[in-house]
C-alpha cells in the first residue's frame, strides 16, 4: 500500500522521474509476490475513492451530469468518466473508467443491475448511454467485478505493467484531487453543491 501511496504522491506533485521509478518497483513487486500487493492496493484505492465520491453512494454532490438526468447512478458515473477523459491522458482516464465499472458492478451485485441503471447496467437517458456502452466494452476487455484492473488493462493493450501502474497512480492522484475539489466546493456553497462541476 505504501508503494502505491508514494506513487500517487509523486503523480500529484508532478515528479515524473520518481513516479517512473515507483511504477517500476510496483511492477517488479507484483511479479515476484504471489499476493500481488501493488495491484490489489491500487485496485482498492481507486475503487474506494470512486465509491466515496458518488452522491448516490453517500459522497459529495457536484458532478455536472450534462443533462443526463439528475444525479442518478448512470448519469453521475457517466459525468465522472467524461470529466476524467477531458482532464487526463487517455491511458490514465481508462483507469478511472475501469474503477467506475468495477464499483458499479459491485453496487448492482449478483441480483442484476441497480434499480436506477448505471454503468454496466441498464443505461439511463442522455450521455449515460454512451458511457454505458463504453463500460460494456471495457468489461469485455477484462476488468470485471472481483477482477484485477491491471491484468484487464494489460490484456487489452499489451503495454508494460510499469506503464500501467504509472497511469493508475496518475488516475488515483486525479481522483483524490477531484474529491478534495468537490468537498471544498460543497463547504463553500452547500446550497449549490450539486449544481455543476468544480472549476
Image (cartoon, grey):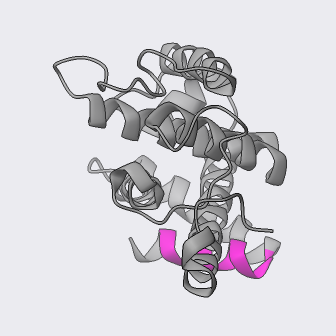
Residue ID at (34%, 52%) = 57
At which x and y percent is residue 77? Answer: 54, 39
120 or 184: which is nearer to us? 184
At which x and y percent is residue 24? Answer: 62, 60
Left-right relation of 82 to 105: right
Residue ID at (50%, 13%) = 140
Q: Among all residues in the image, which is located at the extreme left? A: 111
Left-right relation of 31 to 89: left
Is residue 5 covered in magenta? yes
Q: Is residue 61 above or below residue 182?
A: above
At which x and y percent is residue 88? Answer: 79, 52
Q: Is residue 141 above or below residue 77?
A: above
At which x and y percent is residue 116? Answer: 37, 27
Q: Is residue 159 above or below residue 42?
A: above
Q: Among all residues in the image, which is located at the extreme bottom? A: 188
- Identify the image quadrant of the C terminus: bottom right
- Identify the image quadrant of the N terminus: bottom left
Mainly helix, strand or loop, the magenta region? helix
Q: Which residues are magenta?
A: 4-15
199 or 39: which is nearer to us? 199
Residue ID at (60%, 14%) = 133
Q: Residue 123: in sight, yes or no?
A: yes
Q: Is residue 139 above or below residue 87?
A: above
Residue ID at (50%, 31%) = 74
Q: Residue 146: in sight, yes or no?
A: no
Total marks shown come to 0
Is residue 53 covered in magenta? no
70 or 129: which is nearer to us? 70
Left-right relation of 100 to 146: right
Amino acid at each position: 500500500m505504501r508503494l502505491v501511496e508514494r506513487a500517487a504522491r509523486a503523480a500529484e506533485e508532478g515528479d515524473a522521474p520518481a513516479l517512473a521509478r515507483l511504477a517500476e518497483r510496483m511492477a517488479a513487486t507484483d511479479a515476484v509476490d504471489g499476493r500481488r500487493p501493488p495491484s490489489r492496493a491500487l485496485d482498492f484505492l481507486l475503487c474506494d475513492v470512486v465509491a466515496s465520491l458518488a452522491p448516490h453512494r453517500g459522497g459529495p454532490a457536484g458532478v455536472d451530469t450534462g443533462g443526463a438526468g439528475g444525479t442518478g447512478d448512470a448519469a453521475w458515473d457517466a459525468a465522472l468518466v467524461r470529466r476524467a477523459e477531458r482532464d487526463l491522458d487517455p491511458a490514465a482516464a481508462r483507469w478511472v473508467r475501469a474503477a467506475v465499472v468495477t464499483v458499479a458492478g459491485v453496487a448492482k451485485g449478483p441480483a442484476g443491475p441497480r434499480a436506477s441503471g448505471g454503468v454496466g447496467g441498464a443505461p439511463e437517458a442522455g450521455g449515460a448511454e454512451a458511457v454505458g456502452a463504453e463500460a460494456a466494452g471495457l468489461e469485455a476487455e477484462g476488468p470485471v467485478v472481483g477482477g484485477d484492473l491491471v491484468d484487464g488493462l494489460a490484456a487489452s493493450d499489451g503495454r508494460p505493467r510499469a506503464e500501467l501502474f504509472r497511469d493508475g497512480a496518475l488516475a488515483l492522484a486525479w481522483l483524490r484531487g477531484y474529491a478534495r475539489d468537490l468537498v471544498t466546493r460543497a463547504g463553500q456553497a452547500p446550497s449549490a453543491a450539486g449544481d455543476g462541476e468544480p472549476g
